[in-house]
């Protein structure tokens, strides 16, 4: 197989791949972009349902626990002043029978309660909320987070993963679906946002949501139309209206669907590899223009 | 006994609200004297933990029972810890709930839902 992978020269580029809804093709695009780049990092931020590993099949080299700080009350020192309960805007503390009670899964680890306590009756203890796996898949450094069942938020895991991204010319951040806190955390440090969509009305409405989010964060962005058919005209009209370029169109193709269903990379096939290589080139070009 | 009921309005003839944590207000009715007071539910617009905050207001009101259609697990934990019993509401007004509670026709609330815990 001839080596047609491109090397993104110069600085590092972090590309966040997002979409307003699940099943649009975030992971499909992310793993294939990472695989097409010669030297890349892939970060699976969809910590509620990480699935990038199914396609990249990395060898896991290290697993680490993600812990958050939660308050622990020393009831003998507490005089029941309630200042911690009044302070907590996440309502993670209740006041029952003269003492505060902690609801750890609602705590956002701000540390305010322990700072405020006049009796120094609040210490912080560590609580595990999930794990991060580090591995390699060929030239791709692989990072993937998994949130423990029943936990309310994956943000601490995403924040830690983003901090730990190894140096690579291209980093692809596979975002969670939607446009909530965990997506914001995933795109914060990105240089570019690729908005994956499909040419349906549902896809269009979700595109508007993520576009609004990316613009709130002042990120340059472009559309990738997945499952592109003749009806892609609708997306072209939308792209003109929102003044956002379409960087790639991935065809609605049975062979692609079959490859994905079998856990295979489309970028490994001659027919489809140019889509991802061209997209990388376009991204590289847009970054130079920005600079 | 004082009983707390999530209410759509500030009168005894207001309908019971379908939600516990997000109800606009609670009415705490004294079943012996017929007096009542209204507690605005500050948790209605809370980002998270609304059930806990709402339950806290009820604990602080001195109510001994809650009549509600629904209750999440965190709110139930707060209410249980304070020794407040939960009764299942039936369609009607707050006054109807107070009467039904007095007549002993209400069933205990057995379904505690897992909470929505949505982080926006």
Image: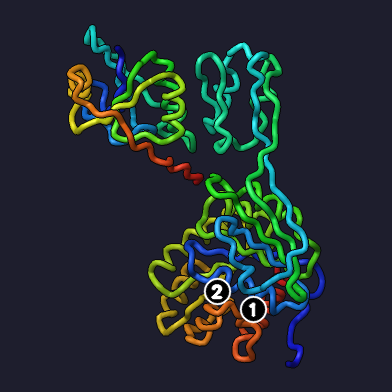
Q: Which mark is residue A224?
A: 2
Q: In which quadrant of the rendered image does the C terminus of chain A lie?
A: bottom right
| On screen, residue A63 above or below A270 | above
Q: Which residue is mark 1?
A: A279
Q: Quadrant of residue A31?
A: bottom right
Q: In which quadrant of the rendered image does the N terminus of chain A lie?
A: bottom right
Q: Which tag, 2 or 1, sits closer to the chain's start?
A: 2
Pointer 2 and pointer 1 on the same chain: yes
Task: Give the side of residue B30 with respect to residue A193, left or right.
Answer: left
Which residue is pictured at 42% across the width and 27% down the height?
B54
Q: Are marks 2 and 1 in contact (CB under 8 Å)?
A: yes
Tell me residue A67's x, y (percent).
69, 43
Q: Is residue A137 visible?
A: yes
Q: Residues within 10 Å of mark 1 (few under 14, many from 20)?
A: some
Q: Quadrant of residue A72?
A: top right
Q: Quadrant of residue A37?
A: bottom right
Q: Is residue A221 visible?
A: no
Task: Give the side of residue A244 with respect to residue A274, left or right.
Answer: left
The chain carrying label 2 is A
Tell me residue A250's x, y (percent).
53, 81
The chain carrying label 1 is A
| On screen, residue A152 above or below B87 | below
Q: Which mark is residue A138?
A: none
Which residue is pictured at 57% across the width and 28% down the height?
A102
Which residue is pictured at 73% across the width and 69% down the height?
A59
| On screen, residue B86 above or below B18 | above
The local secondary structure at tag 2 comes to: strand
Separation of marks 2 and 1 at Cα, in angstroms = 9 Å
The local secondary structure at tag 1 comes to: helix
Tell me residue B23's x, y (percent).
34, 31
């Amino acid at each position: 197989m001839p080596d047609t992978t491109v090397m993104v020269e110069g600085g590092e580029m972090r590309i966040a791949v997002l979409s307003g809804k699940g099943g649009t093709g975030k992971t499909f695009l992310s793993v294939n972009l990472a695989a097409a780049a010669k030297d890349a990092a892939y970060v699976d931020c969809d910590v509620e349902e990480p699935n990038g590993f199914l396609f990249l099949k990395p060898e896991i080299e290290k697993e680490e626990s993600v812990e958050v700080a939660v308050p622990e009350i020393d009831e003998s020192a507490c005089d029941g002043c309630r200042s911690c309960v009044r302070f907590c805007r996440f309502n993670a503390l209740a006041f029952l029978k003269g003492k505060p009670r902690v609801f750890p899964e609602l705590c956002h680890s701000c540390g305010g309660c322990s700072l405020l306590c006049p009796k120094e009756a609040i210490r912080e203890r560590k609580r595990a909320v999930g794990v991060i796996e580090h591995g390699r898949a060929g030239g791709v450094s692989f990072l993937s987070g998994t949130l423990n069942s029943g936990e309310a938020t994956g943000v601490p895991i995403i924040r830690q993963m983003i901090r730990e991204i190894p140096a690579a010319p291209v980093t692809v951040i596979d975002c969670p679906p939607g446009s909530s806190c965990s997506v914001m955390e995933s795109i914060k440090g990105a240089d570019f946002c690729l908005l994956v969509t499909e040419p349906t009305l549902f896809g269009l409405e979700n595109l508007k949501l993520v576009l609004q989010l990316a613009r709130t964060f002042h990120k340059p962005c472009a559309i990738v139309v997945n499952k592109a058919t003749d009806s892609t005209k609708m997306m072209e009209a939308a792209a003109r209206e929102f003044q956002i370029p379409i960087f790639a169109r991935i065809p609605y193709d049975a062979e692609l669907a079959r490859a994905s269903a079998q856990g295979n990379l489309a970028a490994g096939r001659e027919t489809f590899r140019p889509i991802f290589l061209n997209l990388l080139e376009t991204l590289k070009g847009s970054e130079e223009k920005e600079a | 006994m004082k009983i707390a009921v999530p209410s759509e309005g500030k009168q005894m003839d207001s309908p019971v609200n379908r939600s516990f944590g997000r109800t606009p207000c609670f009415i705490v009715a004294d079943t012996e004297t017929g007096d009542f007071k209204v507690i605005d539910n500050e948790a209605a617009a809370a980002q998270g933990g609304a059930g806990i905050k709402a339950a806290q207001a009820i604990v602080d009101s001195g109510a001994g029972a809650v009549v509600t259609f629904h209750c999440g697990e965190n709110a139930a934990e707060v209410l249980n810890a304070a020794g407040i019993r939960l009764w299942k509401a039936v369609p009607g007004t707050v006054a109807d709930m107070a009467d039904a509670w007095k007549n002993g026709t209400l069933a205990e609330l057995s379904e505690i839902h897992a909470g929505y815990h949505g982080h926006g």
